[in-house]
Image: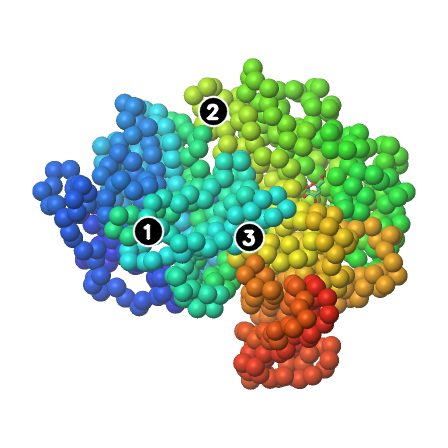
């Protein structure tokens, strides 16, 4: 079998490689671990390329060395630290017992293991068998102290990705403090990059932003306690002329749902350093003697063919090797959710006709959203009281769940397990569960507060309450929401000098609670949510195979949101609903057909009162549902391509091709109409050029090569926001 990792003793070079990529690291003077290369595969490294030596002013040298041409300040390093002669952004900062931040990391040893070790307590990519991947573990040690850093690099046999993380071990007798411990660092030489990030806001998530990497340090981060709407944990470095289909693209996605920090620094010699990890803001981890700290991991994807290929690498890794749910390969149910239909104003009797209509329209699941528990009639109360609100369900929740099941639909339920309202029984009994700094008044957001999830007692309380509901066996799906960010960060169980651990302990607590639920209820389909897509990250994918992409359900706004989301996350992970027009969030009026076509790009649902629709729209729902059932296997699990971006043009187009290339779904949305419209014709990609394909609506037949080279003209129609969807099938 092909080796995935080699060590060349003579050149002291490690080579991780498969048919697509190579990653090279070398051991240099003073046992410094240096970065040599990451990119397109080479068969063998012959020792040629080596970092040039040059005496650079004010870039000092190794202790005790008279060689002025070797400096850690310019060498591309694999993992740098504070306190030594590297003035660029360090990957780690350690506070030693003597109060200094001095560390000096040197190469000590290496190990190659088949497969990939699991990261305990953290989401991670996994392997199906040991043959599909190998992991290089390089140990660096602090030359003058008792501290070791294991750098983990996993390469998969068939993927253009490397997964990295770091484990820090205190091998001495003294307690140390980790003030920063990143998951990875990478230094590039002679690259003139642009960076692509995914900033946003609530109801405006993941809008692609592309800027130059200039000299200085660029920081993309979250200190909100979650991965956040405001800055998704992802960065891509691309060449200036990289497009969707050409050029180099390096993508970095963090498998973590809490505070993150992406630092991109262009140094004085135009070299680019990337450092990614848990944000060091209010982070200070006490590492006691013999203890270790495992960082979350980063997925690094390389594409030599533009952004689409990079995204496909992420999609397939996240889908195949991060998501674990039994639903990962099953077509996702079409649902109706009562949130935008009723908000808090519902009872069992009011919901039943929606369920009846859903059945009539071929919808497969009813989701009961916020307001079914405690005494919750608005968003001011009851979070933390996960027992049915008798006023709305006098016969209990099971009774209503039975009704939904009798109609042949699955039953889904909303929870917000991480929160507490002051107006709740939980608060009356356990006011200390509310995260707050003693002696200070915590800040509300949406009039709610965060639970101190780092505490086991708090997690157990919520788990026991959820158990009571879920043990009935009548719940098929839950929507796990989180509607505010962390402030007043403090954990009652920890001493003053360890409060810098709270942010991360919160995330570990969340993962622990999720793991318990996933473990006890393997049949439950869990949809993640955080005020829409506020926690849409690869870490959550480990527990939630699908996530509500945004509280903005307007089809036109959704074009940019879904386009940006698709940069990293697979289509099956993204839920998308048809809602009313004018839209509740922005008042825009769009055609029903357009709303359907945009929502069908992800896991389709409806978020409106089905009973209030006119006959024409009711008919449209039936047709959309029927159509979606025909295409969803392709749109949820096929290879996804972005063709046109509505953020930068008047059109959005994307396409999904089944793995066997026998089916294709192309969606096009024209944003604004014009009296003198330009003719546009998307060209398809990824088809078999030799196969004829039949348009399932018009029954016209086109060659795969025709669709890819000539394209097809978009229809010209009056009116803004028109959309078209084509479903082609290869003719046998
Ligand atoms: C969040 C979610 C919505 C809905 C509300 C309920 O905002 O994103 O879909 O569930 O909470 O309060």
**Placement of the N terminus among the 4 image quadrants:** bottom left
Q: Name the N-terminal-most of marks 3 and 2.
A: 3
Q: Is mark 2 within 8 Å of ligand 1?
A: no
Q: Position of residue 629 (x, y in %)?
A: 74, 65
**Residue marked by disc 1:** 272
Label 3 close to label 2 by CB (< 8 Å): no
Assess whether mark 2 and mark 1 are in contact (beta carbons under 8 angstroms): no
Q: How many marks?
A: 3
* Residue drawn at (73%, 66%) of the image: 719
Q: Is residue 705 above or below residue 680?
A: below
Q: Would you place residue 330 above or below residue 285 in this image?
A: below
Q: Which residue is mark 3?
A: 207
Left or right: 19 as drawn, with respect to 568: left
Precedes in sequence: disc 1 or disc 3: 3
**Occupied quadrant, residue 217:** top left
x, y (%) of residue 519?
Answer: 62, 43
The single residue placed furthest to the top in the displayed view is 439
* Figure quadrant, ligand 1: top right
Q: Which residue is depicted at the point 50% across and 60% down?
A: 311
């Amino acid at each position: 079998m092909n080796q995935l990792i080699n060590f060349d003793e003579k050149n002291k070079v490690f080579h991780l490689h498969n048919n697509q990529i190579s990653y090279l690291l070398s051991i240099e003077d003073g046992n410094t671990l240096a970065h040599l290369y990451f990119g397109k595969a080479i068969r063998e490294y012959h020792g040629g390329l080596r970092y040039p030596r040059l005496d650079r002013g004010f870039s000092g040298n190794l202790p005790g060395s008279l060689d002025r041409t070797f400096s850690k300040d310019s060498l591309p390093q694999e993992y740098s630290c504070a306190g030594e002669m590297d003035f660029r952004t360090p990957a780690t900062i350690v506070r030693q017992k003597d109060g200094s931040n001095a560390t000096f990391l040197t190469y000590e040893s290496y190990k190659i293991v088949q497969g990939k070790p699991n990261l305990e307590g953290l989401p991670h990519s996994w392997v199906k068998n040991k043959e599909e991947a190998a992991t290089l573990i390089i140990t660096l040690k602090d030359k003058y102290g008792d501290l070791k850093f294991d750098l983990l690099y996993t390469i998969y046999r068939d993927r253009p990705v490397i997964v990295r993380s770091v484990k820090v071990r205190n091998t001495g007798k003294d307690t140390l403090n980790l003030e920063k411990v990143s998951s990875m660092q990478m230094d590039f030489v002679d690259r003139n990059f642009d960076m692509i990030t995914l900033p946003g806001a609530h109801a405006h998530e993941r809008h692609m932003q592309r800027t130059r990497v200039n000299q200085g340090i660029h920081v993309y981060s979250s200190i909100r306690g979650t991965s956040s709407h405001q800055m998704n944990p992802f960065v891509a470095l691309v060449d200036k002329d990289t497009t969707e289909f050409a050029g180099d693209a390096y993508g970095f996605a963090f498998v973590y749902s809490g505070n993150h920090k992406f630092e991109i620094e262009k140094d004085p010699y135009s070299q680019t350093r990337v450092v990614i990890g848990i944000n060091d803001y209010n982070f200070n981890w006490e590492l006691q003697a013999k203890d270790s700290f495992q960082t979350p991991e980063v997925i690094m994807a390389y594409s030599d063919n533009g952004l689409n290929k990079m995204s496909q690498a992420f999609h397939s890794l996240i889908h195949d090797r991060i998501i674990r749910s039994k639903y990962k390969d099953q077509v996702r149910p079409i649902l109706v959710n009562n949130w935008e239909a009723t908000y808090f104003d519902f009872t069992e009797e009011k919901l039943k006709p929606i369920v009846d209509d859903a059945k009539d329209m071929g919808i497969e699941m009813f989701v009961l959203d916020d307001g079914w528990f405690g005494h919750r009639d608005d968003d001011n109360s009851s979070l933390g009281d996960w027992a049915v609100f008798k006023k709305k369900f006098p016969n209990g929740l099971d009774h209503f769940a039975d009704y939904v099941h009798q109609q042949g639909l699955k039953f889904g339920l909303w929870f917000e397990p991480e929160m507490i309202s002051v107006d709740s029984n939980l608060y009356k009994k356990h006011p200390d569960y509310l995260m707050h700094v003693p002696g200070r008044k915590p800040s509300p957001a949406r009039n709610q507060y965060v639970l101190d999830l780092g505490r086991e007692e708090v997690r157990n309380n919520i788990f026991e309450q959820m158990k009571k509901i879920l043990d009935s066996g009548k719940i098929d799906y839950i929507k796990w929401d989180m509607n505010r960010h962390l402030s007043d960060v403090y954990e009652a169980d920890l001493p003053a000098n360890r409060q810098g651990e709270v942010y991360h302990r919160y995330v570990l607590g969340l993962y622990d609670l999720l793991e318990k639920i996933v473990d006890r209820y393997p049949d439950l389909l869990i949809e993640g949510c955080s005020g829409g897509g506020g926690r849409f990250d690869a870490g959550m994918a480990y527990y939630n195979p699908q996530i509500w992409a945004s509280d903005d359900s307007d089809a036109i706004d959704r074009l940019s949101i879904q386009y940006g989301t698709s940069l990293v996350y697979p289509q099956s992970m993204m839920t998308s609903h048809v809602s009313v027009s004018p839209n509740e969030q922005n008042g825009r009026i769009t055609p029903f057909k357009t709303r359907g076509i945009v929502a069908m790009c992800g896991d389709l649902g409806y978020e409106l009162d089905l009973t209030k629709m006119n006959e024409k729209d009711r008919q449209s729902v039936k047709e959309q549902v029927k159509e979606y059932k025909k295409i969803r296997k392709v749109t949820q699990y096929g290879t996804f391509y972005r063709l046109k971006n509505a953020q930068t043009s008047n059109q959005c187009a994307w396409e999904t091709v089944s793995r066997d290339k026998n089916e294709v779904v192309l969606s096009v949305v024209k944003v604004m109409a014009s009296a003198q419209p330009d003719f546009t014709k998307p060209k398809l990609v990824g088809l078999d050029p030799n196969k004829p394909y039949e348009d399932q609506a018009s029954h016209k037949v086109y060659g795969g090569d025709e669709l890819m080279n000539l394209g097809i003209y978009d229809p010209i129609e009056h009116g803004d926001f028109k959309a078209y969807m084509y479903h082609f099938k290869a003719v046998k």
